[in-house]
Image: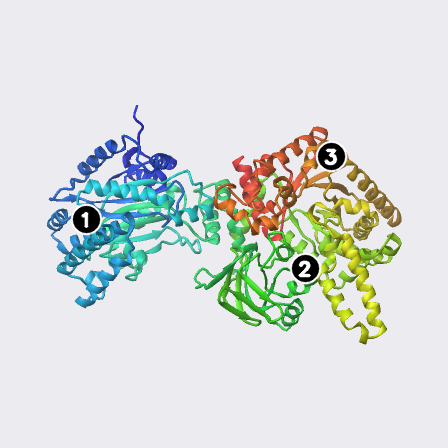
Amino acid sequence: MTKKYVYLFREGDKEMRNLLGGKGANLAEMTNIGLNVPFGFTLTTEVCREYYAGGEKFPPGLWEQVLPAVADVEKAGGKKFGAVQNPLLVSVRSGAPVSMPGMMDTILNLGLNDETVAGLAQATDNPRFAYDCYRRFIQMFGDVVLGIESYHFEYVLDDVKKERGAAYDSDLSVESLQEVVEKFKSIIRRETGRDFPFDPYDQLREAATAVFRSWNNQRAKIYRRANGIPDDIGTAVNVQSMVFGNMGADSGTGVAFTRNPSTGERVLYGEFLMNAQGEDVVAGIRTPKPISILKEDNPAVYGQFTEIAGRLENHYRDMQDIEFTIEKGRLYILQTRNGKCTAAAGIRIAVELCREGLISKEEAVLRIDPAQLTQLLHRRIDDSARLDVIAHGLPASPGAASGRLVFDADVAERRGDDGEKVILVRMETTPDDIHGVLAAQGILTSRGGMTSHAAVVARHMGKPAVCGCEALKISYADHRLTIGDAVFAEGDEISIDGATGRVMRGIIPMVDPELSDEFLALLGWADNIRTMNVLANADTPADAAKARAFGAEGIGLCRTEHMFMDQTRLPIVQEMILANDAIERAPFLAQLLVMQEDDFYGILKAMAGLPVTIRLLDPPLHEFLPSIEDLTEELLKLRLRADSETRETQQEIYKKEGVLKRVRALHEENPMLGHRGCRLGISFPDIYAMQSRAIFQAAARLAREGIPVLPQVKIPLVVHYKELEILRTQTEEVARQVMREQNVQIEYKIGTMIEIPRAALTADEIARYADFFSFGTNDLTQTTFGFSRDDAEGKFLPVYLDEGILPHNPFAVLDPGGVGKVMAICVELARSVKPDFKIGICGEHGGDPSSIDLCQKLRLNYISCSPFRVPVARLGAAQSRLNK
């Protein structure tokens, strides 16, 4: 039996979206509910897939199905395709299963030639209209089908208008349009070496081929990649009889939304043009009128349209984007689809549709893309702003900022304290720069990836950051930034967009975040649906308070090393590291104990009654020390002036030499897999003991104040159960000591991070010594793939994505085929010894909707992410529960 490739509109319905594409399915649906839709048929998405699978050739038997479909449309409309008298003209349009507005190609007025144009002129008694359609068709066919740049035709049209003194296309006479037609045909002959095709069936075959071919044009591929649309679903092609909005003053065309796509307000929103075709509305040649004016110009048509708009919204139970044409006073509906809108509008529309009884709360929750919520939580660039983009980097921390360039953290702090808005620009940031990061509006670096110091700190502070922008050439000595041929001095104004990685010249208009009542209502519905808890990664009381305000149910990761970055603490940390033994370390650990206790007190208090998971020191110690290069340079300068300087200089040299010796001793070739995490705690048990005491002393203070606390101690980078056994024993002993000293009882838990495949593969052994597991998905991804994140994202990972080797950046979206399998093994092994064992994730994957889906499938108990992604995670967790 021959496969069915062609469906008449009356043969389909809205449930056939995957086969007929969104446009074809909706045209079929509107036909079947009795709307005035021009007759037509659809070539299915299967044709597109087979076209590419067969080396860009149509499948056998396709044309034998197209011909009777054309005949059916001829009969329904009372016109003949290719006939001289009363000819049938058609449009040929794309329509993928997922809306891709403007990404693929369209041809209108197909079927015209030198004979049929005369027949159209006679049938309509309007030669000017007929030749206007003909010149439009030739230009569109030449551009879309034959690949001739549109400017060739535009130049000719402009020249003719100038010669005739015509301001608009509509001012040209029949004779002028006939001249344009002949010149357009000459362009085709000159540019392609062939004549414009005369046979309408040849035109149709070539046009359908061009539309299928546009599935893989550059803009369509970029759009699919940006929106996560698969490359293999293909597009359908819709062939539809033409109706004309350019037949005179009683004809027109327009586009309208059933609600305002910017605000969500329940009001008809759109625009139209009389005596025009669809491309005139979008081309900007003439200024369209607001749809409300149609009520004055043609009350009957406006009333009919508003009735249809309401009917379509009720039928599809969503805001609709409707294309229409008025031909000699009669209204035709050419297309409807679920309208695209801003995140704020989408939330308002979903909530109001629910309250109007059209959709359920569950449907409202599923309507919103969680990733879009980020727009509402940070300052963002005004959609109407004109941008001068000068470079691109990695979108390391969302939000947008404008300010004056500064290259030094001290300068950033000073100017920031003076009320000036600055952007801190560095090759890369270090803990020494933290005061500048705090003072700046945003961070821009030429090195580093999504987990670099700048990226991590910026995300937790809610500041925008663009990292790894390799186009930047920074000269600290000259206080100058070069991007290509452009040179920027300190004090020049730039803007960054941390959501897209764009760097822009000048100050850009921004939009401040606003959380509407509808936003809060939707998240409340999501909370009642989801089964996973949503926690936050927070390192300060301010972070914790913000996380709680965004609905976090606790802290899933508090990175204690970030507390060491303060400039007042860094010298103490460095002295502690440089100490030769535990005795020398003791006084510095005592100072840090007081500071850490205050840190933990503030965070535990901000999250009173909720769990706070505190990870003990994780990074290698050398990260808190100056670099070997900087120390060597400083020593060289000191030695050069040593002969003429004082005894103090000699002492300073001696001290620097000691620091350099210690830094070299701590130096590692691959620190990510080196002396860090629990390995550090076992080598230097007094450091972990100090941190544990700080945690429990802070908890004891709060307990005595009557504030409920739930501290959880997390041991990082465990690969063997004995590591956890040793450090758990030490932590429990410290807890007992503090509770005995303070005469209080504290409920607490001790767990570990699963960041290394071996830990996952021996989870049944490790779980015996743990109260919970937390997947550190950044390190687990690095160790499973064997990728260094900063190197991968800056070097070969973009190539892997472009070549389709990987579908997503695995550091942004959890890899289900590799990392996900490792996690699944871990969950199964751990729960084989403790069936109710608590397991979650605490990497930035916890705020990614696709990764949240995987966590739901793995039956994790919680996800943890940065405070500003908590609402995203709340909604994503609810959607994962509904989609499971």
Task: Please state if 337 lies on the left or on the right of 622 as rendered.
Answer: left
Q: In the image, what residue occupies the spot 37% across and 35% down?
A: 53
Residue 117: x and y, percent? Answer: 14, 49
- Disc 2: which residue: 430
Q: In the image, what residue occupies the spot 50% across and 45% down?
A: 801
Q: Point out the frontmost of discs 3 and 1.
A: 1
> From what the image shows, is residue 119 above or below residue 403?
above
Query: Which color mode does the image show?
Result: rainbow
Distance from Cα at disc 1 to Cα at disc 2: 66 Å
Q: In the image, what residue occupies the spot 74% across and 56% down?
A: 602
Q: Quadrant of the C terminus?
A: top right
How packed mark 1 is, by other alpha carbons closer than 10 Å (few <14, some 14-19, many 20 or more), is: few
CB under 8 Å between callouts 3 and 2? Answer: no
Instruction: Indicate the amino acid at tag 1.
Output: Asp
Name the one closer to the observer, 874 or 856: 856
Residue 359: x and y, percent? Answer: 45, 41
